[in-house]
Amino acid sequence: MVTKEVAKIISNSIKIPTIGIGSGPDCDGQVLVFHDVLGLYEKIKPKFAKRYLELSDEIVNAVISYKNDVVFGKFPSSEHSFSMDKSEFERLKKEID
């Protein structure tokens, strides 16, 4: 969190690359945490990060949908389960008995 003015002075004064976090466009590179860019956290909104998505809303909605599907018996279903051949199942039951 060096100011953009200081970052420009430093970047122009040294021969090695500079990497900034909220330090403006004159650094050679930027560090951004993808959680900030994608909006994974509703309440954490750093000034130096541009949000390209409000993913926290989508995540909350997905978790609510998952919970409801489980509670109402919609998930998991046969579509989301593995099955074995009926004859193999019968042999297994016979072996267990």
Image (cartoon, rainbow, N blue to C red):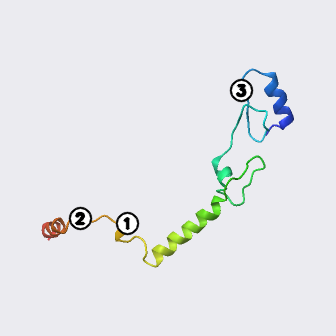
| Secondary structure beneath label 3 | loop
Residue at the disc numbered 1: 80
Instruction: Give x and y (percent) for residue 91.
Output: 14, 66
Residue at the disc numbered 3: 17
Residue 84: image tag: 2
Q: At 65% across and 53% down in the image, what residue appears?
A: 38
As drawn, 53 above or below 20: below
Q: Residues within 10 Å of mark 1 (few under 14, many from 20)?
A: few
Q: At 73% across and 48% down in the image, what residue appears?
A: 49
As drawn, 34 above or below 64: above
Question: Mark 2 is on which residue type?
Answer: Met
Q: Residues within 10 Å of mark 2 (few under 14, many from 20)?
A: few
Question: Mark 1 is on which residue type?
Answer: His
Instruction: Give x and y (percent) for residue 13.
Output: 82, 22
Quadrant in the rendering for residue 58: bottom right
In-front residue for pair 17/91: 17
Question: Mark 3 is on which residue type?
Answer: Pro
Distance Cα–Cα, label 3 vs label 1? 50 Å
